[in-house]
Amino acid sequence: MIRPCDQAEAPHALPFHALRLGVDALRALCGLNLHGPPEPTDVDAAVIELHGFLVRGSTAS
């Protein structure tokens, strides 16, 4: 759900706050909440395992 901007905030060119849209989209699509208290349905980002890669012999000078 797109939350409209508060009238007390500075006016934006868009009728919604872009950062709030991103936060809401991340929660809706991925179940992740990076801002504010977690909800019961949110994924715990601390338990997500990521693959790591080691780059050897860098050619950067």
Image: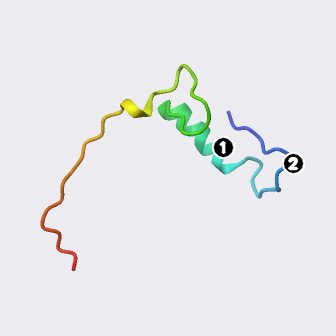
Q: Residue at x 66, y 43 (%)?
A: 20
Kindly identify which numbered label has been placed on residue 8.
2
Relative depth, front residue between 46 and 19: 46
Q: How is the image coloured?
A: rainbow
Q: Residues within 10 Å of mark 2 (few under 14, many from 20)?
A: few
Question: Picture quarter containing residue 3?
Answer: top right
Q: Is residue 24 above or below residue 12?
A: above
Q: Residues within 10 Å of mark 1 (few under 14, many from 20)?
A: some
Name the N-terminal-most of marks 1 and 2: 2
Image coordinates for residue 37, horizontal then vertical, percent: 60, 30
- On screen, residue 43 versus residue 2, left or right, reads left
- On screen, residue 32 versus residue 10, left or right, reads left
Q: Residue at x 77, y 58 (%)?
A: 13
**Regarding mark 1 in the picture, which secondary structure is present there?**
helix
Q: Residue at x 71, y 48 (%)?
A: 17
Question: Mark 1 belongs to which amino acid?
Answer: Arg
